[in-house]
Amino acid sequence: MNTVLAIAGVVIKELYRRKDFYVLFVLTAVITLVMGSVSFFHDTKMVRYVKDIALLLIWISALVIAIATTARQIPAERENRTIFPLLAKPVTRWQVILGKFAGCWLACGMALIVLYLFFVVVSGTREHHWPLLNYCQALWLQWVMLGVVIAFVLLGSVVFAAPSSNATISFIVVLGILFVGRYLNQVALQEPEPLKTLVYTLYFLIPHLEWYDVRDLIIYDQKLVGWVDCGLATLYALLYMGVFLLGAWLVFRRKPLNL
Amino acid sequence: MEPIVETRNLRVEFRAQNSGQAKKVAVNDLNLSIRAGEVFGFLGPNGAGKTTTMNVLLGFVNATSGSAFLFGVDVREPIARQRIGYLPELTYYYKFLTAEELLRFYARIFGIPRAEADRRIEQLLKLVELDAARKRPIKTYSKGMQQRVGLAQALINNPDLLILDEPTSGLDPLGRMKVREIIQRLKNEGKTVFFSSHELGEVETVCDRVAIINQGKLKVEGRVTELVEKHQANLEQIFLNIIGYQPQLAA
């Protein structure tokens, strides 16, 4: 565990010493504040638009941070040859995978906390009410979803040597799941066999990341998702994380360390 | 006395790049035995199989056949690496960390308590003369400084065996001298050092025994003084003769 945490610590240090997060945070803040300062037709519901935009930017920023940070972890270790002194210590390849995962996930969690704090301040000062529990639930679900994304990208990073190709493929897959994943069963119904079975299988195989998107509940001040459902969604995500991490380890343990 | 490093009929084959080609034999039936307190030089031309042998000892590559042991433990067991320090050739350490943070990271991996880690980091940064640059990110270091931080990380666990892959490669004469001094110092402390190098003069100065391999096969092994006496030549001439270099053809 100590080894995993030590490796995770280096990943976290890398995130806050690089400019990526700060650039995305400033971009999110500036766009949100500019949008918030404009008054369209004296619309009293303006705050909803601001919340919508801010949450969308938080989702995009978090995905960019998670995918870009994770995609470069293993390839950078191999390219800079730091994997050699690391594995020359009593460290297993499974610990490297777990450490990288934990580091990326925790780093994204910290980034999310900063982004949500900004969101709470912006929406709270305009609405004058603070549904903190809703925000905590939204943050938790988004973080859990990011865990699945990070584990998936980590699997990609041991398959693809170039971080850019891994990041691009991962973005397409994640956005595809978020936008199309929920409709696959309906698509399947309209298709002839064997395509129907194939699309249905895909529907049940992919992790349904869209379940973790509760932005509308925040924007329209709706009730929280039940905590049991929240727990089940967490277990569902943990299962996918486990599968992707196991896959990453199975590939990595046979992988030559030289690029 | 049990050898510190041992290989028995070690063979490593790599798949051919093209399907029509035969498998490449990187290491062929290699038997090595290094005893405690020895400085052992591992020599050979480029592509001879030195780094592959080291990679097997470090668990990076699996042997096709034969076996390898560190302190009597099979190298496939991670615990075999608990008492070793390894300096790879040309490594660029985490450039966003400082030397102090890098050493603390590796100390944590070995489970060294914080107070003890602080003491060792202090000692090692002085040894490799990076005390003044300890708070600077590694990305600002020169090549020589990076190599010295690499040497420091290899020593963080106070290892009984050091495996150094061309430790002076790419260094200026001053940098080489400093690394050589450190190896000499480790030897005086009774550490076992297993290192590969192309600097034969350096090997002749610091090594007790050497092994020369070519095309994956062990060609000669013995004490430096005995080899020099037996062949009536210096180590460089012995090396060139063994690998089949013919000066008249080159001319």
Image (spheres, rainbow, N blue to C red):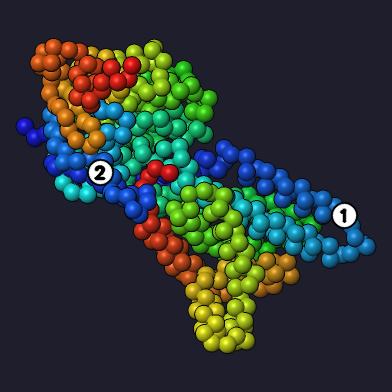
Q: Residues within 10 Å of mark 2 (few under 14, many from 20)?
A: some
Give me the residue at 42% from left, 65% from top.
Answer: A243
Does the image show residue B201? yes
Q: Nearer the viewer, residue A32 or B83?
A: B83
Q: Quadrant of the N terminus of chain B?
A: top left
Circle 2 residue: B25
Give me the residue at 22% from left, 25% from top.
Answer: B244
Does the image show residue A101? no
For this view, does B215 lie left or right of residue A133? left
Place residue B80 in its image quadrant: top left
Rounded to the nearest angstrom, the CA distance separating label 1 from label 2 is: 71 Å
Instruction: Please determine whether, in this image, residue B221 is positioned above or below residue A35.
Output: above
Circle 1 residue: A38
Q: Please report, as a chain letter, where disc 2 is located.
A: B
For this view, does B83 lie left or right of residue A13? left
Give me the residue at 22% from left, 16% from top.
Answer: B237
Q: Please report, as a chain letter, where disc 1 is located.
A: A
From the viewer's perspective, is the residue at label 1 or at label 2 nearer? 2
